[in-house]
């Protein structure tokens, strides 16, 4: 009994109240305050470079820009919200906002749609990798270089711009290769008359007759290279009218007006009509290199031989792509050329992660490829499409390089966007950094909603 007494007394001492209470387990030792501060210091050391960078390049510029927007152009006089009021009374600002709206509506949607189409098509062909490389390749080109490329491509002069060169070639092919002698006219005292742009003989001609067309006013550069020495037409048959269309002057001067002489060139490619008394075209012909023509198959009667006005209109010159009418479309096209590859790669990565068994099951059930795409593939890619679309919206709201490089001087106001307006007002001659800072804050406010959507989307993906 005496040996067990100490064992019975121990629980009572440990419990503090009553006998037989079991002893509590020992409390684990907590970390000391010094150890906690050491962990905080280590974390702060790792975060410090990023915090310093964000503070110096993000927070400080935003705060300083906001403060600067409340001062005048010199930065000395406080003007409150006057810069914001002035900003919304400038016509250039309204043009910039309108163009930014066009950019946001058109460019991201087109890039995303093309990226989706390219990603799906590349997934179905054997040479898909090469196709992706070709489409993505413009991303390797800087925006500045891409702007220079597109400005060169869309030059209005067909001899400089490849696009208009192709358009003019098609126009000339459709036009049958007809020549265009802009400015050509008859001599005032000659045997020809001009009416509504066309040139015809002053007197009617019967089959078997001759009608020549001596013309002046044709520039040397408009005479085709294949033009030869003018020659008199052969004597026509009883059902034809013949003649020569020629340039009625000799380089260096001399010669007799209205006569076909040495040194006078024929005008090839001219369209010639024989018009009957009712005003209908009875026959047509085209002049050869020496300017000769023959209108054949004519019935008896009198005809007016005429050169229609189509011979004297300006030749195909393409389209003024860089004018104020089309300039925004050209810049958006250049942006799509660059960024469609980015959208394609992002969507292709999402396409590779979806469950292909759903597509195969739909095909097994008899669904067409269009149904598989619209009912399965596109809905499964919806999260990726939203990310791509929002990213491109943020990007186009800040567009600057292409809009600054591509438009010529006369078209810059029509292509203006907020970022370019901000730079022009602040540094491009305006020297009004108060107004420029207000424009920068406006651009920040426009970008913030898209940034918030992207951040929320990323958080949802992490939580799912």
Image (tube, helix red, strand yellow):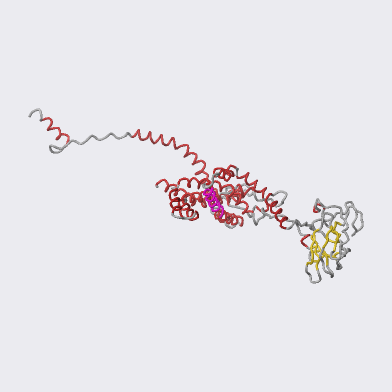
| Residue 355 in the image, given as x and y percentages of width and height | 43, 48
Could you tell whether 356 is left or right of 422 in the image? left
Of all residues, the one furthest to the bottom in this rendering is 278
Q: Residue at x 13, y 38 (%)?
A: 18
Find residue 221 and report its horizontal and vertical position in percent.
80, 52
Q: Nearer the viewer, residue 277 or 81?
A: 277
Residue 256: image quadrant is: bottom right
Residue 2 horizontal side relative to residue 122, left or right: left
The quarter in which the N terminus is drawn is top left
The span picked out in magenta is 106-121
Picture layout, residue 355 above or below residue 13: below
Q: Is residue 292 left or right of residue 106?
A: right
Depth check, front residue: 251 or 367: 367
Q: Position of residue 62 (x, y in %)?
A: 51, 46
Residue 382: x %, y % from top left: 47, 52
Q: What residue appears at the point 80 percent right and 52 percent down from the top-left corner? A: 224
Against 129, residue 270 (above or below) is: below
């Amino acid at each position: 009994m005496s040996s067990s007494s100490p064992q019975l007394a121990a629980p009572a001492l440990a419990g503090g109240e009553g006998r037989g209470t079991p002893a509590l387990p020992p409390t684990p030792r907590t970390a000391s305050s010094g150890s906690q501060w050491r962990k905080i210091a280590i974390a702060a050391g790792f975060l410090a470079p990023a915090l310093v960078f964000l503070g110096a390049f993000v927070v400080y510029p935003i705060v300083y820009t906001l403060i600067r927007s409340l001062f005048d152009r010199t930065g000395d006089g406080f003007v409150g919200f006057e810069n914001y009021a002035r900003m919304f009374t400038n016509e250039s600002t309204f043009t910039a906002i309108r163009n930014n709206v066009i950019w946001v509506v058109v460019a991201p949607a087109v890039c995303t749609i093309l990226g989706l189409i390219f990603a799906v098509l590349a997934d179905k062909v054997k040479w898909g990798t090469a196709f992706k490389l070709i489409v993505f390749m413009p991303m390797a080109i800087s925006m500045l270089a891409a702007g220079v490329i597109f400005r060169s491509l869309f030059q209005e002069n067909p001899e400089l711009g490849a696009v208009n060169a192709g358009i003019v070639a098609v126009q000339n092919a459709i036009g049958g290769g007809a020549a265009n002698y802009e400015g050509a006219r008859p001599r005032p005292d000659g045997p020809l008359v001009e009416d509504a742009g066309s040139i015809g003989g002053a007197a009617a001609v019967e089959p078997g007759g001759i009608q020549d067309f001596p013309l002046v006013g044709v520039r040397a550069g408009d005479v085709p290279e294949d033009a030869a020495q003018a020659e008199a037409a052969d004597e026509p048959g009883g059902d034809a009218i013949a003649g020569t269309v020629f340039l009625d002057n000799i380089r260096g001067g001399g010669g007799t007006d209205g006569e076909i002489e040495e040194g006078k060139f024929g005008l090839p490619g001219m369209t010639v009509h024989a018009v009957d008394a009712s005003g209908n075209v009875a026959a047509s012909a085209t002049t050869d290199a020496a300017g000769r023509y023959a209108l054949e198959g004519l019935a008896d009667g009198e005809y007016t031989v005429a050169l229609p006005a189509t011979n004297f209109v300006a030749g195909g010159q393409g389209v003024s792509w860089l004018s104020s009418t089309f300039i925004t479309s050209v810049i958006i096209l250049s942006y799509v050329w660059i960024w469609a590859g980015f959208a394609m790669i992002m969507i292709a990565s999402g396409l590779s992660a979806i469950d292909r068994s759903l597509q195969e099951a739909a095909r097994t059930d008899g669904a067409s490829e269009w149904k598989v795409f619209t009912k399965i593939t596109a809905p499964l890619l919806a999260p990726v499409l939203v990310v791509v679309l929002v990213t491109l919206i943020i990007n186009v709201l800040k567009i600057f390089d292409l809009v600054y490089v591509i438009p010529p001087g006369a078209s810059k106001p029509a292509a203006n966007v907020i970022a370019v307006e901000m730079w022009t007002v602040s540094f491009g001659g305006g020297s009004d950094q108060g107004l420029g800072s207000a424009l920068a804050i406006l651009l920040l406010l426009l970008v913030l909603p898209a940034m918030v959507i992207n951040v929320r989307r990323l958080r949802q993906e992490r939580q799912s």
